[in-house]
Amino acid sequence: MSNYHIKHLEEYYQVYRESIKDPENFWEEIAEEHFLWRKRWDKVLSWDFKKPDVKWFEGAQLNITENCIDRHLQIRSDKVAIIFEPNNPDEEAEHITYKQLHERVCAFANVLKSKGIQKGDRVCVYLPMIPDLTVSMLACARIGAIHSIVFAGFSSTALSTRLNDSDCKMVITSDGAYRGAKTLDLKTIVDEALETSPCVESVLLVKRIHSDIKVKEGRDEWVQPLLDRVSLDCPPEIMDAEDPLFILYTSGSTGMPKGMVHSTAGYMVYTAYTFKNIFQYRENDVYWCTADIGWITGHSYIVYGALANGATTLMFEGVPSYPDFGRFWQVVEKHKVNQLYTAPTAIRALAKENLSFIEKYDLSSLKVLGTVGEPINVEAWDWYNDNVGKKNCPIVDTWWQTETGGIMIAPIPYVTPTIPTYATLPLPGIQPALMDESGQELKGNQVEGRLCIKFPWPSMARTVWGNHQRYKDIYFSTFEDKYFTGDGALKDAVGFYRITGRVDDVIIVSGHNLGTAPIENAINEHPAVAESAIVGFPHDIKGKALYGFVILKEVGESRIHDNVRKEINQIIAEHIGPIAKLDKIQFTQGLPKTRSGKIMRRILRKIAENNFEDMGDISTLLNPEVVQDIKDNCIE
Ligand code: WTA
């Protein structure tokens, strides 16, 4: 018997040791007992971090939707797979059983086929958090098409870049989205994006807000009439273990987003295994992850990991503040949620509000509370623990990344002791290493360094779409033979990990990873701007907010400056999305640079934090005199 479900701490340590001693045996047992394979693998693992090249379960054949849907039909056919809670609390929630999900996915898959989509084609899904989002991604997986889900908050430029990068043939979108009191016009964004994305041949439209939109003859089509015409059965395409399942873009420190490619079998095995253990999911639990499916958290822990375990997973269309700040708690009470998985930024936003919003509701169904996306501060952790969990629910602080596919370091609830701000222990099969700047591994406890992973795990991304060299350069070149995460971490006296934050040019704002370069490129498009640099500074709710230092071509009056500030944020919203807008913009005459011309962000970061002590040695700068000037004019 494999150790699929860990129940106490000694068992964790024992399982962990076994998983390190013989990783292949460990994952093989899990794969064998808990999934449906059309053909067994020839080899569990082959790997080489130098190339890098990693393959899990080579030779095996399967379809992930058979594992997430079909195999549950025998015993869970009428069990609810998806609860859909709409944006408006007065609109009725939808309960979709496994049987209904099967029919909807099959029908959608048949529509995709009828539109000429084939195995290996890329299909972009640009939808709000409605059931069709899950259905369409699973429909792609059903027929072997590779889905690329783009968060429906991204702008048309960001969407177009992503469509072109992976040569998407089709976009699935809707007539709009509800978001709190607002509606968003997704179709216009898609239309704009398609002006510069000739690869897209067709657009499927889902009706959500019943708005009057333009339907372009020959390209756009409403999906419902097509769904009404097709069969409710669609045999799954048989996929090889390493066939790509999806592409998901993540921001990097250079201009282009990276299309992380996840493959089928390893991703399935790992997300299912971690879902079971991290959330201690039991058969009749109701599980709710508040992330958007447009991010990896939604892919792995609303959809694939949850459904692979036959779970009931809740999809929420709305926002925590609508119609008021009690909405999360109202949803927990209404659907008797057992596991809640959310982000520190949401916790901080809700913690600012009156406790009466939370006290109105019965939260006694909750058993496990999860957090993800950025380091959680002690105050937020305590508030979550005291007021949501009533000190009765373990908090699982889960560290992982788009690139890792699944949760890597996290406590197992009711097994691992929890400590505020600590992600605690690596999951079985995960071998972290902390490195110093010279590339030496810091062995033992009480060390702090750069977080790497030194052995492959099943759900790691296999490449960057269309650019394997970039994958190698970014993740496998900083430290020899190790995957470098871009994060810093420390290990305490007993070996518990605490993630300290990014050590590269990625800034996490409200849980969204933002690379500095794409934002700076957008700012520099403003005709009045000569150069710019952005850094993060601490923010009560967002965790980090953005501070921009901008050099103008000509210095003007302050009235003009205010206009330029507005215009810069407009350009950023158009190029990337409103999430990347700057909170503070300081106009400056110069930026501190090294003699080789690199901007010294360390100094700008200090200034943005209004922390002028310990600026380090600035004498080696090309232009040390600008530092005083920037300090004198900084925004508090
Ligand atoms: C950060 C989200 C501290 C980290 C699943 C990582 C965290 C990046 C945590 C990945 C956590 C995520 N504690 N930091 N529990 N979880 N991060 O790709 O910097 O959107 O590298 O994946 O978020 O963000 P991504």
Image (cartoon, rainbow, N blue to C red):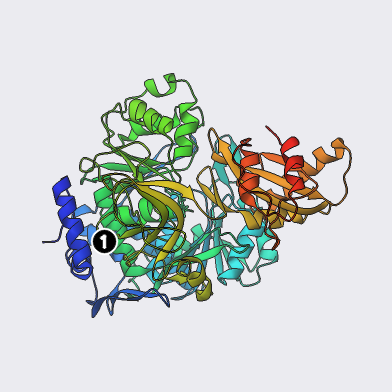
Residue identified by numbered label 1: 429
Quarter-of-image position of residue 266: bottom left
Q: Name the residue located 36 percent from the left edge and 25 percent from the top edge.
A: 387
Query: Callout 1: 10 Å neighbours few (<14), some, many (20+)?
Result: many
Quadrant of the image containing the C terminus: top right
In the rendered image, residue 617, in percent from the top left (x then y), is placed at 63, 48
| Above or below, comparing residue 10 to residue 336 in the picture | below
Quadrant of the image containing the N terminus: bottom left
Q: Name the residue located 69 percent from the left edge and 45 percent from the top edge.
A: 548
Q: With 518 as the anchor, is 370 left or right in this view? A: left
Quarter-of-image position of residue 494: top left
Q: Name the residue located 28 percent from the left edge and 80 percent from the top edge.
A: 59
| Above or below, comparing residue 417 to residue 386 in the picture | below
Q: Can residue 447 be seen in this view?
A: yes
In the rendered image, residue 172, in percent from the top left (x then y), is placed at 53, 60
Identified by mark 1, the residue type is Gly
Q: What element carries label 1?
A: loop
Q: Name the residue located 23 percent from the left edge and 58 percent from the top edge.
A: 73
